[in-house]
Amino acid sequence: MAQASSSKQTERLDTGSFSRVAPFSLALARHDLKLRRKKTTTLQINVGLLCNQACRHCHLSAGPNRVENMQPDTLDAVVDYASKIRFGTIDITGGAPELNPHITDLIERLSPLASTLMFRSNLSALNDGKHDQLMSVLTDHKVVIVASFPALNASQTNSQRGTGIFEVSIDALQKLSARGYGREGSGLELNLVSNPTGAFLPPPQDQTEKRFRKVLRDKWGVSFNNLLNFANVPLGRFRQWLIKSNNLDMYLEKLAAGFNPCAVSGVMCRTLVSVSWDGYLFDCDFNLAAGIYMSGHKIHVSEMTGPPREGAPIATADHCYTCTAGSGFT
């Protein structure tokens, strides 16, 4: 099935890039590549931009003062869409998705609809003393938790995310570990996401994962399944910081210099559709942050009669270099 008949496919969009970096579409063309959709297997749901943190690296500029949150009518439309399409993976994100007042209901309704249900947490919102029930719901439904944990160093984490966040995050990981998360044979998967704190690219993932695994186990008794070591996306609050610190040009050049044509085949936008808090569709959460709608115009999830059309072009801009630098961003 194709997307709603009211939509009209457009050619790939490129919103431009910083003056000294070639448009991403040109990088693709130089390698005779086209960024087009494959079969859509993942539904990503951004339930809102409200967050208890205001991280410097946030591509969405989420924070305590944001009021955008998915409302029940939009939630119903998303669940209806998920029930019709039966995606292999459903990925719940935010902001801090814990702070959406309907999040427990959403998890319980989505759990039977996908082989894998993922929940992206910053850990501190999950461990604020108000979400013990949510932690139990995640455990009961064997929801995969993808947790932001940028560094093993307390001062580094707190400078990026806020005072005391490191300690609260460690405590949250220990609570999840006590429930079985990250432990072999438990069926409860815990993946960590690490991001650099400045205008530089992350170190090799395998080395970082070994170090995280050893330190977390030996010092705090915490286990996890996988570490995802990603570069920061030059959007939102992070882009503003890059501009203010005169690092945007240099950072984009680093990303563009690291362009890996082999990474294009595995970028998540080829198999994912992202739904915003107000129900509109995007090729990915980064395009959502940039305001670049899927197919170049607003399509509401309630209009969809099927998954996005295979072969449809994917909108691009300079932030796409992040997903194709080095080993890529999936």
Image (cartoon, rainbow, N blue to C red):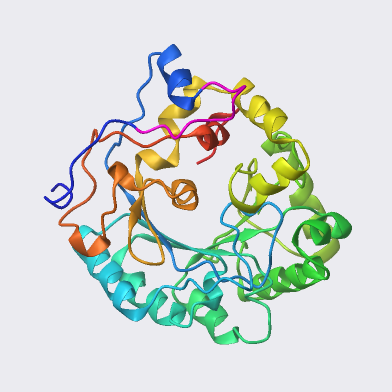
* Visible residue check, residue 209: no
Where 301 sits versus 290, above or below? below
Where 250 sits versus 285, above or below? above
Residue at 57 percent of width and 69 percent of height: 96
Residue at 35 percent of width and 60 percent of height: 115
Residue at 45 percent of width and 81 percent of height: 104
Where residue 172 appears, x then y in whole percent?
70, 73
- In the image, 163 versus 65, the foreground residue is 65
Magenta-drawn stretch, dominant element (helix, strand or loop)? loop
Outermost residue, right direction?
Answer: 155
Q: Quadrant of residue 257?
A: top right
In the displayed structure image, the side of residue 62 where residue 157 appears, left or right: right
- In the image, 75 versus 264, the foreground residue is 75
Where 55 sits versus 70, above or below? above
Residue 220 on the magenta segment = no
- In the image, 274 versus 140, the foreground residue is 274
In the displayed structure image, the side of residue 120 where residue 301 appears, left or right: left
- In the image, 218 versus 158, the foreground residue is 158
* Visible residue check, residue 126: yes
Where residue 323 appears, x then y in whole percent?
53, 35
Residue at 84 percent of width and 54 percent of height: 156
In the displayed structure image, the side of residue 188 where residue 271 appears, left or right: left
Where residue 265 appears, x then y in whole percent?
41, 29
Where residue 166 appears, x then y in whole percent?
80, 65
Q: Which residues are magenta?
A: 13-22
